Image: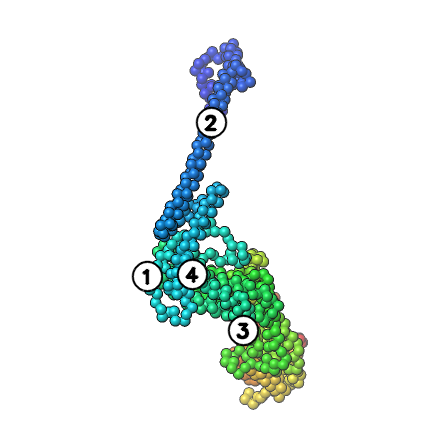
């Protein structure tokens, strides 16, 4: 597009070229102006659509006329095409009907002639036409074809079913005789059977023409069997109805194992025959998606499902029999999948157990029996409930009830982990979490009921038990089953929620960063209880040691003489009761607690004793050179050996005490110099602050300079010669 500047330049250039210097004459300019204004008015008149005489109006009117003519012709053509389509549609409609009629006539002729192969082929063609029409909107034709196909299907099914039944009789199907394996079917009989199976597969109705059964809600979970398998299962179904329905003695609702066992025996006895003689026919016809053995199992399983569904409502008020039926059904489902390779994707008896009314009853029974079991194993009458058995070879030192409880939870898991729906599994998980919390509360009640010395009570065993359950839950949380439940639970609650980590001290016996588990909250409660129990045990020992320490703490440390020979030093007599209590109680704890829990406990005791000696003895006493040496001897040669039974470096757990001994036992000159250095450099920063280096030279790393000065002030040889007394 030409810009305004360029357009202006072109106009100026044109005027200069055509008129030149004459443009300097005003009259010429006025004449040109009038001429151009006249041209503008003329052009506007030509472009004015409201002007009937304008050329553009004439052009527009002509164009509209042509458009109207085209639209008229288009409508005529559309009408013609529509009529042609209707005629074509009608022709095709009639052709289909004619084709169906011809096929029906041919089928009738071949049926009268007894040509089974041709009958099956014609029916397959007829069925294919109906299958293609089944998804269209041609209601009447679809209905006509469906009725026609079903009619011929029933006719041919009746004929081939009779032939099939005759063939089955020749091979003595079903194999209910214990010696049937010894009888090899004749080759001619097998061939005839396979031919009829092929015909039956050809006349089987396509899924599009099948009306879903509304007999029972769970029937929709069972895909329809292929026609040959329906006929193969039928004799077994009749036997099943004969034995397990009506007034027969074998029809007992309290004995579901009878019909479950019968179904399994039929599967075992007939599977090989199907795999050897029936499956090859299906493969030959390209029906690889049909597994004859699986279809037989599914058909027989449906018999058990119908029977179980019929019996369970009458057992709602008989807890024992109801529970027995559930157990047998789960056992049947497990054996079916493990021993007979029944695919997990196929429907089974679980569809009955997960019906709302049955499932609610099942859940209530699980909870009832679990609580009864817990009551029994924690009963006060069981004197050995909290005494570890002699057979405990793993050093668990747990109560027998813990293993019973874990076995109870594991049994519940095994019963519900096969349920197909995550929602049902989550409900069982909630039951397990509830039982875990109930068990924890019961243990807590036992703890509160304890009296006397807690070390000789059941509390250490309870702590071991809690720790054992923690480890089991941690292992379970990493199992695929529980990881899936964790995912489903998060999806239901809040897909974006991330549980907070479970914190613990550095002495924790195992990694506790396991929040991505369904047991996170339960583990947190168990760990909190376990820590409280261990702390109580540690505090109990420390309290007993403190009770014996009064005389030792008030020894005249400032008046003790410096021995002539260090080898003449011996343990301060008043310290004997303290160290005896520590040694005795630590051995008791080692006997009662597991190794990991004992390690946590003795470390806690050591740290508490360290703090106690520092705060109540060092900071409350003054030490002569002899007193400091005696205190160091008591600690390093008597206290440390008690803990050296459990660690190679006991001094690392008595930091405050050992560093206090270091400051109290350095020579007087070194102590004065160190003290002056620490005081002089107070307030120094950066490279000028050499206080930390000075403390390290005498073996002090834990105390800050101010605390070091305070400890030095407790030396008699310093405080007697200075005015500064802390």
Answer whether residue 81 is visible to the viewer in this image. yes
| CB within 8 Å, label 4 to label 1 | no
Q: For marks 2 and 1, give the one nearer the viewer.
A: 1
Residue 344 tag number: none
Distance from disc 2 to disc 4, alpha carbons, whole Å, reads 63 Å
Residue 232 tag number: 4
| CB within 8 Å, label 3 to label 4 | no
Q: Quadrant of the C terminus?
A: bottom right
Q: Residues within 10 Å of mark 3 (few under 14, many from 20)?
A: few
Q: Position of residue 618 (x, y in %)?
A: 63, 79
At numbered mark 1, what does the secondary structure look like: helix, strand or loop? helix
Distance from disc 4 to disc 1, alpha carbons, whole Å, reads 19 Å
Q: Position of residue 112 (x, y in %)?
A: 37, 49
Q: Which residue is mark 1?
A: 188
Q: For marks 3 and 4, give the one nearer the viewer.
A: 4
Of 89 and 567, nearer the camera is 89
Distance from disc 2 to disc 1, alpha carbons, whole Å, reads 70 Å
Distance from disc 3 to disc 4, alpha carbons, whole Å, reads 43 Å
Q: Earlier in the sequence, mark 1 or mark 3?
A: 1
Q: Earlier in the sequence, mark 2 or mark 1?
A: 2
Q: Position of residue 49 (x, y in %)?
A: 54, 19
At numbered mark 2, what does the secondary structure look like: helix, strand or loop? helix
């Amino acid at each position: 597009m030409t810009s305004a500047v360029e357009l202006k330049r072109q106009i100026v250039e044109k005027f200069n070229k055509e008129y030149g210097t004459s443009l300097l004459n005003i009259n010429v300019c006025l004449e040109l102006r009038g001429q151009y204004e006249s041209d503008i008015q003329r052009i506007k008149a030509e472009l004015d659509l409201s002007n009937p005489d304008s050329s553009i109006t004439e052009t527009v009117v002509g164009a509209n006329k042509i458009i109207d003519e085209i639209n008229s012709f288009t409508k005529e053509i559309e009408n013609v095409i529509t009529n042609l389509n209707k005629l074509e549609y009608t022709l095709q409609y009639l052709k289909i009907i004619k084709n169906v009629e011809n096929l029906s006539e041919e089928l009738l002729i071949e049926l009268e002639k007894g040509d089974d192969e041709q009958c099956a082929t014609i029916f397959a063609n007829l069925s294919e036409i109906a299958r293609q029409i089944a998804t269209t909107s041609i209601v009447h034709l679809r209905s006509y074809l469906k009725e026609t196909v079903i009619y011929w299907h029933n006719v041919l099914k009746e004929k081939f079913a009779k032939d099939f039944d005759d063939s089955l009789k020749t091979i003595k199907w079903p194999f209910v005789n214990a010696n049937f394996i010894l009888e090899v079917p004749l080759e001619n009989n097998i061939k005839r059977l396979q031919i009829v199976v092929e015909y039956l597969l050809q006349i089987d109705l396509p899924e599009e023409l099948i009306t879903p059964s509304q007999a029972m809600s769970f029937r929709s979970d069972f895909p329809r069997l292929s026609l040959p398998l329906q006929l193969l299962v039928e004799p077994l179904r009749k036997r099943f109805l004969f034995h397990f329905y009506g007034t027969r003695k074998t029809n007992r609702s309290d004995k579901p194992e009878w019909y479950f066992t019968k179904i399994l025996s039929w599967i075992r006895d007939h599977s090989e025959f199907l795999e050897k003689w029936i499956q090859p026919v299906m493969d030959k016809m390209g029906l690889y998606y049909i597994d004859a053995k699986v279809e037989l199992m599914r058909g027989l399983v449906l018999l058990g499902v119908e029977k179980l569904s019929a019996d369970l409502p009458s057992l709602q008020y008989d807890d024992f029999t109801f529970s027995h039926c559930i157990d047998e059904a789960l056992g049947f489902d497990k054996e079916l999948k493990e021993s007979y390779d029944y695919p997990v994707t196929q429907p089974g008896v679980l569809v009955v157990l997960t019906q709302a009314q049955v499932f609610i009853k099942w859940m209530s029974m699980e909870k009832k029996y679990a609580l009864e079991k817990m009551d029994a194993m924690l009963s006060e009458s069981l004197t050995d409930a909290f005494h570890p058995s002699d057979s405990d070879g793993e050093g668990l030192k747990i109560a027998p009830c813990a293993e019973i409880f874990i076995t109870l939870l594991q049994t519940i898991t095994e019963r519900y982990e096969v349920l197909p729906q995550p929602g049902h599994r989550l409900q069982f998980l909630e039951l397990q979490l509830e039982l875990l919390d109930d068990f924890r509360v019961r243990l807590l009640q036992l703890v509160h009921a304890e009296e006397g010395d807690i070390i000789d009570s059941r509390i250490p065993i309870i702590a071991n038990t809690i720790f054992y359950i923690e480890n089991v839950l941690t292992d379970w949380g990493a199992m695929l089953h529980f990881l899936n439940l964790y995912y489903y639970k998060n999806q239901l609650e809040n897909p974006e929620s991330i549980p907070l980590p479970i914190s613990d001290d550095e002495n924790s016996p195992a990694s506790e960063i396991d929040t991505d588990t369904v047991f996170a909250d339960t583990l947190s409660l168990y760990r909190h209880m376990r820590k409280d129990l261990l702390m109580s045990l540690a505090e109990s020992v420390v309290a007993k040691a403190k009770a014996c320490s009064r005389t030792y703490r008030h020894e005249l440390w400032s008046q003790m003489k410096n021995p002539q020979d260090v080898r003449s030093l011996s343990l301060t007599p008043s310290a004997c009761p303290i160290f005896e209590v520590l040694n005795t109680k630590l051995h008791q704890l080692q006997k009662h607690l597991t190794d990991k829990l004992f390690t946590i406990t003795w470390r806690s005791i050591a740290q508490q004793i360290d703090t106690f000696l520092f705060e109540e003895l060092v900071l409350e006493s003054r030490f002569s050179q002899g007193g400091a040496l005696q205190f160091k001897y008591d600690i390093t040669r008597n206290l440390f050996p008690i803990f050296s039974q459990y660690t190679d470096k006991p001094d690392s757990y008595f930091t405050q005490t050992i560093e206090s001994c270091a400051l109290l036992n350095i020579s007087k000159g070194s102590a004065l110099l160190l003290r002056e250095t620490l005081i002089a450099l107070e307030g120094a920063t950066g490279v000028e602050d050499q206080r930390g280096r000075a403390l390290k030279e005498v073996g002090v790393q834990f105390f800050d300079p101010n605390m070091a000065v305070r400890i030095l002030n407790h030396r008699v040889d310093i405080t007697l010669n200075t005015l500064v007394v802390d």
